Amino acid sequence: MKLFPTIIYMLFSYISSAQPASLKVDLHKVSGDMTPIWAWFGYDEPNYTYMKDGKKLLSELAALSPVPVYVRAHNLLTSGNGIAALKWGSTNAYTEDEQGKPVYNWTIVDSIFDTYIDRGMKPLAQIGFMPEALSSKPSLIVIIGSRVYLTKRFLPVGLILQMIITNGGSLSSNGSIIV
């Protein structure tokens, strides 16, 4: 934690020593077409995605943009029962059996990505919120199974990423997953 104040001090030192900048815009000069760069959307509660109102909202968001909307949800790997909760959610995509062997269940993740694809959206797979079975401190429950500790082993994490990358078709019908 001693590094944090040093980083903050360096950041503020840099900002305070920066030279003033000016920007001049000629609104009468045409330089080309403007391609939308703001066609993306993200949220925390993945389990609302495939529910009636979630589908309705995503359809409305997709319809607002002249280009495909990129969309991502947090908690794609969070342990739990798949019940939607404010600011949280879970997919239970990775657990382990009694012998410690990986058990993958992509049912909820498939539902999320299929909902995006069905609306012409482009899913972004945010790989975060470690599954409980991979946590080095699984006894410390932090809101619906999300863990903030380092993984106790990296092989399953690599396998999860490999499965998502190489078997993208199992997560979406057209393989348009960005990792």
Image: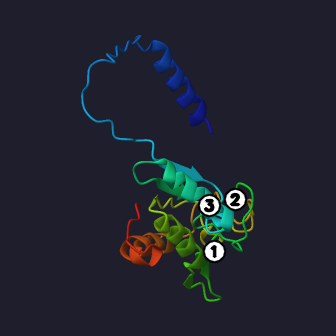
Which residue is at the far left? 31
Image depth: mark 1 or mark 3 in front:
3
Residue at the image position 72 percent from the left and 65 percent from the top: 84
| x and y, in percent, of residue 156 in the image | 50, 74
The residue that disc 2 covers is: 88
Q: Secondary structure at mark 1?
A: loop
Cα–Cα span, label 1 and label 3: 25 Å
Q: Is residue 54 left or right of residue 23?
A: right
Comparing 173 with 7, the one in front is 173
Q: Nearer the viewer, residue 33 or 12?
A: 33
Pointer 3: residues within 10 angstroms few (<14), some, or many (20+)? Answer: some
Q: CA distance from mark 1 to mark 2?
A: 13 Å
Mark 1 and mark 2 residues within 8 Å of each other at the beta carbon: no
Residue at the outermost bottom position:
99
What type is the residue that disc 2 sits on?
Trp
Q: How far apart are labels 2 and 3 at the CA level?
A: 20 Å
Q: Which mark is residue 92?
A: 1
The quadrant where residue 31 appears: top left
Mark 3: amino acid: Lys
**Can you tell which of label 2 and label 3 is closer to the viewer?**
3
Please tell me whether residue 71 is drawn above or below residue 151 in the rendered image.
Answer: above
Residue at image location 34% in from the left, 13% down from the top: 24
Label disc, if present, on residue 56 of the rendered structure:
3
* Disc 2 crowd, CA 10 A, few/some/many (<14, 14-19, 20+): some
Left or right placement of residue 64 versus residue 133 in this view: left
